């Protein structure tokens, strides 16, 4: 208790001192008040059982602080002091910045070069990046970004962006009103923005200008012909609808398919680094046994890209499924079942050779490629969630 009391008073005295040394302008004194309340909130979260005591202590101290800051405010008007938010202790300023949303960081970044440096820091943006984009961006998307910025470095656009300064650059992404909050402090040419930072990747994603690779479940709005499949696509985000536009690579000579309104839950990071045009070399064939969940590459035609289709390993026709007698896992033939299709449908089952499986199939039934066994319950339950309400023909 004593320790708490000491900590509290030290903090308050510290704040008061910093106030008395350099009076804050009107707006930043309210920032400090806000901050002290945050501080208390954190404190109370950490020490819930001391809430009653702290609350009484807090109300009296915050009141004193308020009165004090009010008197400094009066002083401040008279003295016309030059105090800025940058005079806040480093740690305090960091706490404020950490709590700002991306929009807030952008407008803070346009205040002055010192704040810009702080507000564009990798650390702050990595947090936002992970929070919003972590689930859908994989290594392929990051590679694509590197390629994207290096190609822009060569182009005149990149140089223009440098010349025009950070504010103009940002105004491409955020509403002008936010970015132009302080037009008197536009940046000098000698100080170009750090275009290849994590922040610019975040902004480019938000703007929808950067198309990133990912995979889409049940493409083309759950078209029956793609039920329980996952296809590679390039995606562009729309802030207005909080959905994506997907571009699927062309099927042979057919035009590229475009789908709009793809929701977040239909996207995934490609689990393998295999192009949709390459056969994946399966590494699970020897271990496959009935009941395993799998995804298999399938394409209608050899000119088409592969999609990944969900299925399970079934029993051979000669096996009744009795676990004591079942020898299916020793047989060279593996039965794959796609139970979303009705009995008798040509899509319902297929056989593959465990010892020598390459691409198998024909022009009528399509071609079955590499197989990956699903190990995580998360992946399996995702396919279950996508299960169609009607049996497919
Ligand atoms: C594999 O299964 C087939 C058909 O069910 C059966 O005829 C064959 O004897 C089995 N092979 C082995 C090695 O068990």
Image: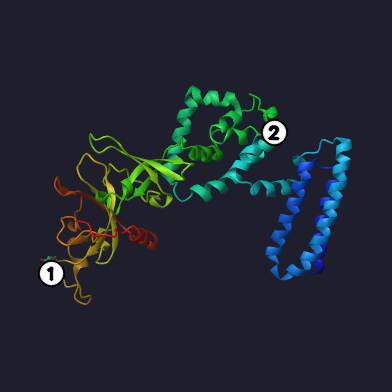
Front in this rendered view, residue 133 or 335: 133
Label 2 beta carbon within 8 A of ligand 1:
no
**Distance between the alpha carbons at the discs numbered 1 and 2:** 76 Å
Badge 1: how crowded within 10 Å, few (<14), some, or many (20+)? Answer: few
Residue 10 seen in the figure: no
Q: Residue 120: x and y, percent?
A: 61, 39
Q: Which residue extends farthest bottom?
A: 324
Locate ligand 1 by image quadrant: bottom left
Quadrant of residue 7 within the rendered picture = bottom right
Quadrant of residue 210 within the rendered picture = top left
Quarter that holds the N terminus? bottom right
Q: Residue at x 75, y 41 (%)?
A: 85
> SS at mark 1?
loop
Quadrant of residue 170 within the rendered picture = top right
Quarter that holds the C terminus? bottom left
- 283 vs 193, left or right, is left
- 274 vs 338, left or right, is right
- 25 vs 177, left or right, is right
Asked whether disc 1 touches disc 2, contact meaning CB atoms under 8 Å apart, the reply is no
For residue 318, the mark is 1
Badge 2: how crowded within 10 Å, few (<14), some, or many (20+)? Answer: some
Placement of 285 over or under 222, stated as above or below:
below
Pointer 1 or 2: first along the chain:
2
> SS at mark 2?
loop
Query: Label 2, on which residue?
Result: 112
Mark nearer the viewer, 1 or 2: 2
Front in this rendered view, residue 169 or 244: 244
Q: Residue at x 39, y 44 (%)?
A: 261
Q: Residue 137: x and y, percent?
A: 45, 46
Q: Residue 61: x and y, percent?
A: 83, 58
Placement of 3 over or under 269, stated as above or below:
below
What is the total number of numbered labels drawn onto the structure image?
2
């Amino acid at each position: 208790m004593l320790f708490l009391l000491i900590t509290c008073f030290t903090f308050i005295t510290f704040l008061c001192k910093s106030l008395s040394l350099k009076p804050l302008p009107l707006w930043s004194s309210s920032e400090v008040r806000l901050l002290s309340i945050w501080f208390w909130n954190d404190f109370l979260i950490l020490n819930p059982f001391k809430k009653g005591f702290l609350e009484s202590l807090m109300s009296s101290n915050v009141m004193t602080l308020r009165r004090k800051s009010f008197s400094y405010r009066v002083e401040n008007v008279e003295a016309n002091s030059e105090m800025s938010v940058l005079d806040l202790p480093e740690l305090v300023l960091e706490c404020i910045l950490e709590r700002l949303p991306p929009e807030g960081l952008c407008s803070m970044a346009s205040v002055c070069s010192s704040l810009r440096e702080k507000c564009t820091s990798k650390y702050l943006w990595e947090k936002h990046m992970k929070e919003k984009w972590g689930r859908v961006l994989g290594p392929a998307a990051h590679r694509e970004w590197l390629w994207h910025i290096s190609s822009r470095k060569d182009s005149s656009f990149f140089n223009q962006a440098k010349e025009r300064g950070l504010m103009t650059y940002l105004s491409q992404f955020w509403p002008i009103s936010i970015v132009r909050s302080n037009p008197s402090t536009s940046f000098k040419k000698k100080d170009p923005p750090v275009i290849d930072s994590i922040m610019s990747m975040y902004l480019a994603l938000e703007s929808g200008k950067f198309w990133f690779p990912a995979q889409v479940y049940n493409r083309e709005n759950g078209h029956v012909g793609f039920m329980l499949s996952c296809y590679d696509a390039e995606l562009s985000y729309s802030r207005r609808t909080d959905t994506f536009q997907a571009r699927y690579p062309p099927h042979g000579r057919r035009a590229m398919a475009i789908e709009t309104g793809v929701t977040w839950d239909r996207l995934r990071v490609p689990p393998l680094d295999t192009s949709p045009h390459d056969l994946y070399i399966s590494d699970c064939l020897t271990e496959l046994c009935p009941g395993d969940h799998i995804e298999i590459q399938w394409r209608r035609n050899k000119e088409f890209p592969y999609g990944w289709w969900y299925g399970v390993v079934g029993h051979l026709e000669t096996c009744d499924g009795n676990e004591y007698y079942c020898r299916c896992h020793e047989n060279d033939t593996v039965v794959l079942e796609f139970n979303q299709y009705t009995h008798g449908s040509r899509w319902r089952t297929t056989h593959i050779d465990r010892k020598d499986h390459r691409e198998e199939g024909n022009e009528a039934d399509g071609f079955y490629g590499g197989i990956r066994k699903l190990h995580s319950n998360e992946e399996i339950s995702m396919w279950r969630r996508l299960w169609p309400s009607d049996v497919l023909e």
